[in-house]
């Protein structure tokens, strides 16, 4: 007797390869059995049979070519089920393909889109509030600080704090003021959501791309990963491409109009590049891109943490 | 004796136009006195003098040319104060210029920007959620309905409601799922803010532009007003310009490349234009723009409510 399982079910054959017993998997069974089969562990049905026929030696079929052929001949009658069950397997394989770098890309994109929304609404808030107290608008540069002060509805305190002598603003009605204040609150809410997403992104990056995170920072690193499309894509890029990720428009313009070629893409957001002088920016961007590529490779192949060494090397070069 | 007030203060002159008494306005005084002066009511200081000299007839100076000249000669010594006090008056005049159509423009712009943010984040939510349960994403068309279902974190119910047999999605970790759910909640929050602003805008429009509101609807009407820049600008436009407000890009393209001229701008959002057939859209847009311009004129000059008649006329034409 032989015990044999495939995507369709578990079968017990006699010596002449005739089916003696069988358990056809339902779609639900496949979900659990697939994992067992792929790990070469007995399926649930096999366990039951192995218990029932426990005095039979070598019950499980060793898949040599000849016996597999015979099994397949017998199971030809079940061919119709292959289609539906293979579709199911494909679905299971699609499932496995949601990797962590895709989650990083979603989180990073959402941070950027939340930023964009916050900026859009903050510009509106400034314009709108300047009807009430125009003198304060350009005294508070930071959008969130501005929204925070406005949300507190402390007109008199703002007048005092910013020494507004006689305002050029209008006394608006209560409804008009409330409309402005609630917009300020909505902006603060959006910022809270952005902070949540940043914490989540930071955790994902530290877990999955610790080396990139150490060298590029989690925000810039995640943006590079997003522009590359995946960690795998990023690893396959030359460093010069990483250096220019996010400068595609300028690069294209350069190629068409022979304008000056861009020296850096969003890598420019890195604190190191903010620090070095104008004439060194191109060189520093290139050196940094080199190290980020190395870091990405280590992260992709799950190598050891060398991020700190990489970061110190590039920092030493440009201090 | 004569009593005389200007931006600098209130003065009491004797018969020979020598100053006998005076009250120089502080900046704070000007705020209250300006209104009284502009209404030709006595200032606070004048009231005090009028009380003190109540037995003197014709105390207040009737401003004939000759006496004004004399007064100005005497007051030449106060010229320095003119600059600062005139600046103050300018500020007061700027104040008065925040008219209700400016508030409408802010409210309408904020509604549009909130919409834009909601759409941006909804697209992100859909892409992100499709990692978890891709089968549901294109079953729910409405972005807010989608966010609402996701925000409730009822995976199993969604699987049941949409007959998802075996999902192609992945079982994400709790943190991953929470990141998605909180984004859905942020979208719903933004929509609440948008609804608040819509109610506020509707109130403003009904109060200040009842005729436009009746003919164009408060949202489309406010958008037209925003594109025009002010109610005054709108009233000065030909109807054909109102018809094309919001189609500036297409109009410019038409002029440069001789592509077909646009037939309508954002007026196309009006339910009437949604209803008429393709070949009638241009004509209907023109007729509607005519009526909206009429409505705007009545609103600008604070005429009587004729909106309902205008609306019925244009509806009768295209039913």
Image (cartoon, coloured by chain):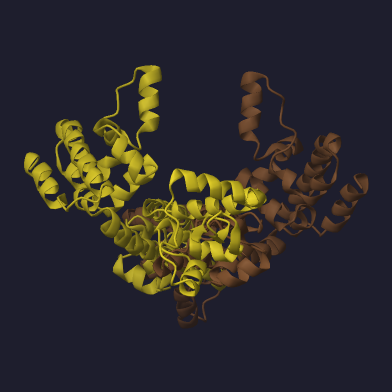
Chain colours: A brown, B yellow
Residue B78 appears at what percent x and percent y?
64, 52
Q: Residue furthest front?
A: B15
The residue depicted at 24 percent of the width and 34 percent of the height is B239
In-front residue for pair B200/A161? A161
The residue depicted at 38 percent of the width and 71 percent of the height is A23
Residue A49 appears at what percent x and percent y?
45, 77
In-front residue for pair B294/B285? B294
Tell me the quadrant of the picture where the C terminus of chain B can be found: top left
Residue B300 appears at what percent x and percent y?
28, 47
Instruction: Please state if A17 lies on the left or on the right of B177 as rendered.
Output: left
On screen, A317 above or below B39? above
The residue depicted at 35 percent of the width and 56 percent of the height is A84
The residue depicted at 67 percent of the width and 40 percent of the height is A245
- Would you say residue B56 is visible in this rendering? yes
Q: How many callouts does the rendering have? A: 0
Instruction: Please state if B296 lies on the left or on the right of A120 as rendered.
Output: left
Residue B118 appears at what percent x and percent y?
43, 57
In-front residue for pair B18/B302? B18
On screen, A176 above or below B255? below
Instruction: Please state if A267 lies on the left or on the right of B48 as rendered.
Output: right
- Would you say residue A85 is visible in this rendering? no
Give residue A38's quadrant in the image: bottom right
């Amino acid at each position: 007797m032989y015990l044999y399982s495939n995507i369709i079910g578990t079968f017990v054959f006699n010596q002449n390869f005739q089916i003696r017993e069988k358990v056809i998997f339902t779609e639900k069974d496949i979900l659990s059995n697939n994992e067992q089969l792929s790990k070469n562990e007995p399926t649930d049905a096999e366990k039951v049979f192995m218990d029932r026929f426990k005095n039979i030696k070598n019950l499980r079929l060793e898949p040599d070519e000849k016996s597999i052929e015979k099994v397949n001949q017998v199971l030809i009658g079940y061919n119709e089920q292959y289609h539906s069950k293979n579709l199911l397997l494909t679905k299971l394989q699609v499932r496995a393909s949601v990797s962590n770098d895709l989650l990083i890309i979603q989180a990073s994109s959402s941070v950027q889109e939340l930023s964009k929304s916050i900026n859009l609404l903050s510009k509106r808030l400034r314009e709108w509030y300047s009807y009430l107290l125009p003198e304060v608008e350009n005294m508070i540069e930071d959008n969130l600080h501005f929204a925070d002060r406005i949300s507190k509805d402390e007109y008199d305190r703002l007048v005092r704090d910013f020494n507004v002598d006689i305002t050029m603003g209008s006394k608006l009605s209560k409804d008009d003021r409330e409309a402005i204040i609630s917009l300020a609150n909505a902006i603060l809410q959006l910022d809270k959501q952005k902070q949540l997403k940043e914490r989540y992104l930071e955790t994902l990056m530290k877990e999955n791309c610790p080396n990139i995170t150490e060298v590029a920072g989690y925000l810039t690193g995640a943006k590079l990963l997003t522009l590359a499309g995946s960690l795998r894509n990023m690893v396959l890029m030359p460093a010069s491409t990483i250096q220019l990720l996010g400068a595609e428009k300028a690069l294209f313009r350069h190629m068409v109009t022979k304008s000056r070629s861009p020296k850096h893409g969003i890598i420019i957001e890195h604190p190191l590049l903010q620090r070095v002088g104008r004439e060194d920016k191109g060189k520093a961007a290139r050196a940094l891109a080199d190290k980020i590529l190395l870091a990405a490779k280590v992260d992709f192949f799950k190598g050891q943490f060398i991020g700190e060494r990489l970061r110190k090397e590039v920092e030493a070069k440009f201090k």
